[in-house]
Image (cartoon, grey):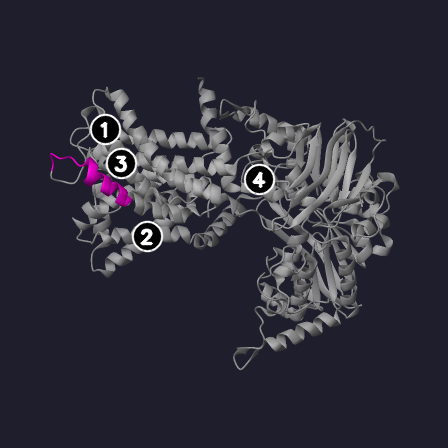
């Protein structure tokens, strides 16, 4: 493939999101960190010390950076999961459940299929996680497409069904009899995502995540399927008019979204835990995926950034702020919540940003638009409009 | 007469665009002053400056001779300026009276005094001949009535000057006549009216004076008794425009579409089509006239696969269209310019290029083996933009940011380019300016001259009369009359449209 062709493949008609598109998320993060300062002062600790500690354990050294990336991996998948559903106008809150069934399916595929070479076994494990998550999400997708039952309700309920269903499967059927802890047998050596650097947990899954992010981008903007998913998400009536089946695409988007959440589980099993450990509750990657997608404006590139931020905050809260600066780790929860709050309250920045932009443009003189511009207000809202489902 | 309002040298600049440049505009007491201009000429901007929604970058406002600063709509309302927007701002489940007093509720001892509110609404309604029932719920009254509620809302707040933004765009011909009577009554009672429009006929019919603006500048202000339609059109567009559609005798061929006894239900599951029959032939424009809500929308949706039929048949080139999905119907050679262009016709947040392939996106050359072909899509878009004169900064501009006329051109370009045997054009020029209307009409006639069948559905009788080779009138879900285009008169069609005596085929159908 020629260089130019390759370039067109990825930058063709849809440009990467602009800086302005990310202005609100960036401002939200800054504002949230400032709110964090207030809370840390309030509990009588030193915010500078706390944030320094946060930085040190997340990006302070190569090893720490790599460990942060490891924590970022599942969030990339769940963030992509939520973003993809959003693009079809769907709010998939079922990431937690899809993650659990994906994890368990991957674990079973990992220990129950002996004698396979790694190049076959690893993809098979990942596929098992993807398929399980996708099938699990297919049901709410079908209910939405066929009966119009809202996916938010169904996916939330499916979370609890999966939690107890998986719990029952493990204790009743899949528990490792040779081990006391409540887990499945360990996956086989051939199923393990290879570790890439000694003394770290940094494994191949990180690159799988990058590849999948690229794949989601490619799917959404370079394929018929993506065109149809986005059309349904943005304007169902127009999609229908254009010969696009709304029902089919809703189900497809839910399956892909669920699959990505399932993949998150599979990668954690194959790269970190090496077995399915039955816990008492949700792991949180599914819910944090919502925040990551929100932060990333439902764009794969944005999701990578959002996942990195949430991965870092998660890691830095416990190992940095709590352990070093003696700030309760729940302060990080406050910061994370504040980020979401500020993004949701983007109207706050909307007032601020156009003013800044106007001032900047005024100093630049009249642009190339000439006299053809619109009656009424210029379309100031569109530049920051990234999301599909509101 | 005394000038109520003077806008002196108003300039309003948006980044990159001068929306208003040194605009002089005044309104005398007791006059209807039309503000005429194409979409995007700066009419609404000027009114938003007046209403305090935008701060002008230059110039001065004078209210009854005194300079004023209108910083926000509350100031405008206090001065006695009322605005009726194109899109109504009413609360559907609430009553007329509740909507009118909303934000300025009469109270007695801290309690809402609805009795007083209703009484005042009734008084105003009688004074201006509005015939509004204060107890009716907004969701149960017609669009025309809702507009009157908006007018009442402004009057209730003491408006001496009313701004009506494109008030006739949403009305049926009968409602327009009634609105004109109301406007006359308003000025008789000493109020003044600014009437924003791009329809020349209405200016001459309604207004006392007219100010024409083009590209943000005032071209002329003149008395309507000294104005002609052609003269105004030229001032508005900036060049000579032909208001008449030039077309040769139709060369009519075989029947392409045959609809027989078609029945279908509307969204509320009530019968909307009750045995609709019509035929459209190759090489003709068949105009379907009718008052809104007589089954036109349902007919279009059935023919394009968006709504199931409950009975009857619809044959295209001898094969049934019923039961097919939109994609299959597209493939049979049906093109469709939908009546709701923003909801149906376009994905507003898609780019112009993406919108131009909607419906053909799964076909070569736009996609190959499931992958979209950016190069082919861009080339197609650039070609269409040029040939259909779509004014857009580029192929990657969002459809949302184009003007209404250019959005419609995107749809027309897309549908005509597929070269369908049957083109269904629903309200193809609603809300468009003269230039765009002329352009679209010419394209429809071209399609017909190439031997295509065109089914034109329009609420504008003018449009039906000037374009159609044959005219059918739909009333309560049936075609009740049919007449050759050159024999039709507005009066006769109007009579049929309101359910009066039926003509020709209608009688045979009984």
Q: Mark 2 points at which residue?
A: A337
Residue B387 is covered by the magenta coloring: no
Q: Which chain carries label 1?
A: A
Q: Mark 3 lies on which chain?
A: A
Of circles 4 and 3, which is in front?
3
Where residue B193 appears, as percent x and y from the top left, is 74, 62
Q: Mark 3 points at which residue?
A: A103
Instruction: Give the mark, 2 or 3, whose residue is nearer the N terminus.
Output: 3
Q: Name the residue under label 1.
A: A110
Picture residue at 81% right of the left edge, 49% below the top: B496
Instruction: Indicate the secondary structure of the residue bearing disc 4.
Output: helix
Mark 3 neighbour density, 10 Å: few (under 14) some (14–19) many (20 or more): many
Q: Name the residue under label 4.
A: A238
Instruction: Give the mark, 1 or 2, whose residue is nearer the N terminus.
Output: 1
Instruction: Give the mark, 4 or 3, whose residue is nearer the N terminus.
Output: 3
Structural distance between the alpha carbons of marks 1 and 2? 36 Å
Where residue A209 appears, as percent x and y from the top left, is 32, 32
Residue A170 is covered by the magenta coloring: yes
């Amino acid at each position: 493939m020629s260089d130019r062709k390759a370039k067109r493949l990825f930058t063709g008609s849809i440009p990467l999101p602009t800086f302005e598109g990310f202005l609100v998320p960036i401002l939200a993060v800054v504002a949230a960190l400032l709110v964090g300062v207030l809370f840390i002062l309030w509990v009588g600790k030193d915010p500078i010390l706390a944030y320094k500690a946060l930085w040190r354990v997340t990006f302070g050294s190569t090893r720490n950076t790599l460990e942060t990336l490891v924590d970022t991996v599942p969030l990339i998948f769940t963030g992509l999961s939520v973003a993809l559903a959003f693009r079809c106008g769907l709010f998939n809150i079922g990431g937690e459940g899809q993650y659990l069934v994906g994890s368990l399916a991957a674990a079973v595929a990992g220990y129950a299929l002996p004698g396979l070479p790694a190049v076959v076994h690893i993809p098979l494990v990942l596929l098992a996680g993807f398929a399980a998550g996708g099938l699990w999400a297919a049901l709410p997708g079908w209910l939405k497409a066929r009966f119009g039952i809202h996916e938010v309700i169904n996916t939330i309920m499916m979370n609890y069904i999966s939690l107890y269903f998986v719990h029952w499967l493990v204790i009743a059927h899949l528990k490792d009899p040779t081990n006391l802890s409540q887990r499945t047998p360990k996956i086989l050596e051939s199923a393990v995502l290879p570790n890439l650097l000694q003394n770290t947990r940094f494994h191949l899954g990180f690159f799988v995540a990058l590849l999948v992010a690229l794949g989601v981008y490619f799917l959404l903007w370079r394929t018929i399927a993506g065109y149809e998913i986005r059309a349904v998400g943005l304007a169902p009536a127009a999609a229908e008019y254009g010969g696009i089946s709304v029902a089919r695409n809703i189900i497809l988007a839910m399956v892909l979204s669920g699959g990505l959440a399932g993949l998150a589980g599979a990668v954690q099993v194959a790269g970190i835990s090496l077995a399915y450990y039955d816990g008492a509750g949700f792991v949180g990657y599914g819910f944090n995926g919502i925040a990551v997608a929100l932060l990333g404006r439902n764009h794969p590139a944005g999701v990578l950034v959002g996942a990195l931020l949430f991965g870092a905050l998660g890691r830095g809260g416990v190992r940095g702020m709590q352990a070093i600066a003696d700030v309760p780790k729940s302060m990080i929860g406050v910061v994370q919540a504040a980020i979401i709050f500020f993004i949701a309250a983007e109207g706050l920045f909307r007032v601020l940003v156009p003013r800044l932009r106007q001032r900047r443009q005024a100093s630049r003189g009249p642009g190339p638009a000439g006299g053809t511009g619109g009656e009424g207000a210029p379309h100031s809202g569109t530049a920051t409009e990234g999301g599909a489902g509101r | 007469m005394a000038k109520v309002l003077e806008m002196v040298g108003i300039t309003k600049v948006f980044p990159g665009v001068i929306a208003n440049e040194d605009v002089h505009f005044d309104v005398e007491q007791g006059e209807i002053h039309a503000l005429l201009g194409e979409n995007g000429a700066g009419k609404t901007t000027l009114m938003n400056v007046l209403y305090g929604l935008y701060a002008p970058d230059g110039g001065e406002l004078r209210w009854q001779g005194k300079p004023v600063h209108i910083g926000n709509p509350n100031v405008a309302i206090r001065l006695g300026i009322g605005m009726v927007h194109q899109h109504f701002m009413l609360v559907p489940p609430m009553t007329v009276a509740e909507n009118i007093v909303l934000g300025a509720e009469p109270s007695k001892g801290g309690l809402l005094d609805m009795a007083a509110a209703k009484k005042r609404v009734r008084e105003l309604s009688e004074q201006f001949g509005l015939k509004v029932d204060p107890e009716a719920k907004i969701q149960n009254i017609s669009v025309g009535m809702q507009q009157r509620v908006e007018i009442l809302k402004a009057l209730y707040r003491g408006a001496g000057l009313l701004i009506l933004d494109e008030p006739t765009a949403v009305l049926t011909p009968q409602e327009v006549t009634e609105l004109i009577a109301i406007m006359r009554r308003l000025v008789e009672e000493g109020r003044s009216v600014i009437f924003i429009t791009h329809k020349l006929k209405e200016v001459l019919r309604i207004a006392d004076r007219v100010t024409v603006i083009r590209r943000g500048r005032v071209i002329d202000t003149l008395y309507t008794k000294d104005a002609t339609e052609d003269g105004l059109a030229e001032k508005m567009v900036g060049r000579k425009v032909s208001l008449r559609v030039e077309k040769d005798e139709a060369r009519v061929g075989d029947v392409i579409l045959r609809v027989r006894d078609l029945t279908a239900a509307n969204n509320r599951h009530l019968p909307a089509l009750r045995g609709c029959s019509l035929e459209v032939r190759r090489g003709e424009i068949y105009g379907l006239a009718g008052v809104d809500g007589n089954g036109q929308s349902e007919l279009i949706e059935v023919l394009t696969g968006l709504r199931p039929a409950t009975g009857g048949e619809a044959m295209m080139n001898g094969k049934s269209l019923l039961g097919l999905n939109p994609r299959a119907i597209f493939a049979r050679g049906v093109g469709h310019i939908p009546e709701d262009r923003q909801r149906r016709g376009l994905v507003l947040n898609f780019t112009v290029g993406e919108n131009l392939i909607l419906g053909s996106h799964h076909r070569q050359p736009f996609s190959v083996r499931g992958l979209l072909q950016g190069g082919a899509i861009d080339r197609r878009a650039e070609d269409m933009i040029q040939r259909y004169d779509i004014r857009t900064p580029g192929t990657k501009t969002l459809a949302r940011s184009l003007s209404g006329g250019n959005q419609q051109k995107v749809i027309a370009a897309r549908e005509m380019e597929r070269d369908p045997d049957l083109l269904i054009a629903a309200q193809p020029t609603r809300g468009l300016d003269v230039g765009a209307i002329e352009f679209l009409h010419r394209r429809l006639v071209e399609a017909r001259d190439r031997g295509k069948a065109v089914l034109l559905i329009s609420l504008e009788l003018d449009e039906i009369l000037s374009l159609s080779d044959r005219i059918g009138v739909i009333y309560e879900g049936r075609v009740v009359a049919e007449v050759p285009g050159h024999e039709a008169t507005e009066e006769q069609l109007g009579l049929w449209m309101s359910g009066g005596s039926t003509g020709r085929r209608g009688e045979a159908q009984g």
